[in-house]
Amino acid sequence: MEANLLRFILFTLVGLVLTSFNDHLHNASSHYQYCVLGAGPAGLQMGFFLSKAKRDYIILERNSGPGSFFNKYPRHRKLISINKIHTGRHNAEFNLRHDWNSLLSDKPDLLFKRVSGEFYPPADAFPLYLSAFERELGLKVKYGVDVGRIRSVRSATGRSYVLTDQHAADYSCSILLVATGLWVPQEVEFAGSHLAEGYESISTNPDDYKDQAVLILGKGNSAFETAQSILGRASRVHMLSSSTVRLAWQTHYVGDLRAVNNEVLDTYQLKSLDGLAEARLEDVVITKQEERGRKRSALKNPESRDKLYLNLRQFKQNGDEGKGSDETWDELPDYIDNFSLRKPYDRVIRCLGFRFNFSIFDSSARLPPSENAKGRLPGVTAWYEGKNTPSLFLLGTASHSRDYRSSAGGFVHGFRYTARAVHRVLEYRHHGNKWPSTRLMTTQLMSWILKRVGEASGPYQMFETLGDVILLRGSHCEYVEEFLLQALPRFSSLSGHDVSSQGLIVLVMQYGKRKIDNLGLGRSETDWTQAWKSNFLHPVLYYYDSLPMEQDMKTRPHGWPLPRPKAIHHMVEDFLTEWDTPLSHIQPLRRFLEHCVHSDLRAFSTENCFRSALTHRKPPLYCQQGYLAR
C-alpha cells in the first residue's frame, strides 16, 4: 500500500513539473529577427521577400487562415480590383499593369487568375488565392495568435519589440512589420448616431429593404456598393456626406468612386427618387418617432419600425443643441420647409470606411496618426518606418498615408511594390545588400528606358511614388529600379549607391496637373513639342546635377513629386501607353539624354565610326563602346 502511495505521489509531482514546464514554454518569449503582424496580402508579400532572402521571420495572424478581411468585406462580395487576364501580351511584367490582385513571386503561374477569371472577381476568391500563395511558397505563418499589446523594449543590443497574444505568450523581434490593414469601422459622433446601423453589421439581403426609405452616411465605395445592392427594393435611397462625389475616372485615384458601383448616380440625375446631399456629419441630428397609428399597425405587423428623422444643428433654435436624439420631430423648427432630407427614413446606415487599430500599441511603441486621411492612418516616414518608432515599419493599406488620394499604395496592385521597396531598405540597413541595380553602357541607356516605360508595372501602378533612378558615371551608368521618390534626399543611405559628380536622372510616371474635361474634346495631347501639357499618365524624366536635399523636397512646386530639376523632359502621352514611336517619343528622348550625358548617343555604321575616328579627336560614344573598342 505504501509503495503504491509513493508511486502515486511521484507521478503527481512529475505531472506538475511537466505542466509547469509546458506553461513556461507557452508563456516564454520567442525571438525572431523579423515579426510580420498580419497574414493578409501585404503580410504574405513581405513573407515571400523574407523567405527568399532566408531571413529569420514569423508571420502572426489572429484568424485561422490568410486574408480573413475578405471573408466578410466587401459586404456585397464583389471586388473592385480589376482582373484583366486577356491583354494580348505574353510579357509577365506588362500584364501586372492590368492584374490588380496577384502578389509578386518567383513562380510565374502563381497568379490570381488561377482562382477567378472574372473581371471584377468575387471576394471569396481572394482568401483562396492567398492560401495557395502561402502554401506553395512555404511561408512561415502562425495562425490563432491574437496580438493585443505591442511594446518597445530597450536593451544593450538596441531596441526590440514584444508582442503579447491572448494567451499572454510573448513574441519578440528586432524589426516589426505591421500589415494589419484597416478593419476598425470609422465612426462619427453626432446627436442620434447610435440610431445608425453599421456597414459591418447590416443585412446584405436586398429583400430586407423592400419598400423602405434608406439614408446612407458616406459617399465612398462601401456606401455606393450598399446603395446599389438595395436600389431595386428600397423606396428611396439618399446619401449624405460632407464632400461631393469624387469619381475615380476623373481623379485617377482608385480609392474614389468606381464606375462599377455608381448606378445610383443615374437614378439621382434622372430623378428616380434617389439622391445625394452634402452636410457635415457632426452637425447631423437624428431623432426617432413613432408614426401616428403605429401602435395599432404594430399589432398587425410586429416588424414595423420607428421612423427616423434627420435635421441639422444649424436649423435648431439656440439652446437646443444638448437635447440630441430624445427630441421629437415636432420640437425641431422647420426654418427651411423644403429641406432636402425632410422626409422620414426607415433606416440610417453608416458607411464611412475603416481606420487603423492604434489601440494595441502601448506608449513605448505608439504610432502617431497621420496628418491626412482624418487621422485614420498611422504617420510614417518616406521609407514607411513609423515616426518615432525605429525598426517598426508599416505595410499595405496601413502605409497609405504617404500617397493618400494620389496613388495606389492602399491597394494590392500598389503596396505589393512598396513592400518590396521596404524589404530592399531593410536588406541594406541590416544585411549590407545594396538596392539591386543594373550596370549599363551609356549608349544602352535609351533602349533600357524605352523598355521600362513600355512594360514596367511598379512605376506604372505607383505613379508619382516609385521611380527609377539612373546614376550617371560617364561612359556607363547604374540603373536603380523603383526607388521611393519621397526619400530621394536619402538615396545613398537607403540604397547604398553613391551619386557621382555626373548627376542623376529620375524616371517617373505621372498625370498632368491641369483640370480638364476627362471625356471632352482636346482631353489628350498628341504634339510632342507640347508634351509638358500631357494630361494622362506619361513618363517624365528629371535631371539633377546633384542629389536634392530635404529642404528641396519640402519646397518643391505644389503637386510635383520631386523638386524642380536642372532639366526636365516629358514624353508625350500615348493612347496605347507604349511610348515607342520614332519621331514623337524616341528622338526627343535621345536629345534630352544627350544633353544630360554631354555626348552624342546616335548609332553609327562601321564606316561612319572609322571616318569619325580619323576626323575627330573624340569619336561618338557609340563608336567608342562599339566598333572602335574591338
Image (spheres, grey):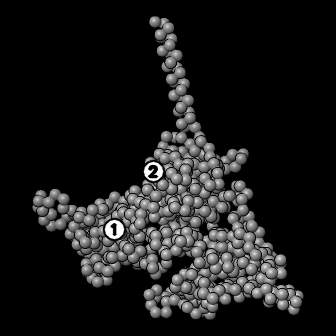
Rendered image quadrant of residue 559:
bottom right
- Quadrant into which the C terminus falls: bottom right
On screen, residue 243 versus residue 583, left or right, reads: left
Instruction: Tell whether label 1 touches label 2 (CB within 8 Å).
Output: no
Tell me if I can see residue 186 in this picture. Answer: no
Q: Position of residue 426 (x, y in %)?
A: 66, 58
Of residues 68 and 441, the one nearer the viewer is 441
Q: Where is residue 256 in the image (x, y as percent from the top left)?
A: 44, 74
Label 2 amino acid?
Answer: Gly
On screen, residue 491 versus residue 27, left or right, reads: right
Instruction: Using the image, tell me which numbered label, if any, was put on residue 65.
Output: 2
Instruction: Using the image, tell me which numbered label, if any, was put on residue 226.
Output: 1
The crowd level at tag 2 (other Cα within 10 Å; few <14, some 14-19, many 20+) is: some
Rendered image quadrant of residue 382:
bottom right
Q: For the point 67% across and 85% down, which residue is it?
A: 589
**Relative height, residue 99 to residue 630 (above, below):** above
The crowd level at tag 1 (other Cα within 10 Å; few <14, some 14-19, many 20+) is: many
Q: How many marks?
A: 2
Instruction: Using the image, tell me which numbered label, if any, was put on residue 255.
Output: none
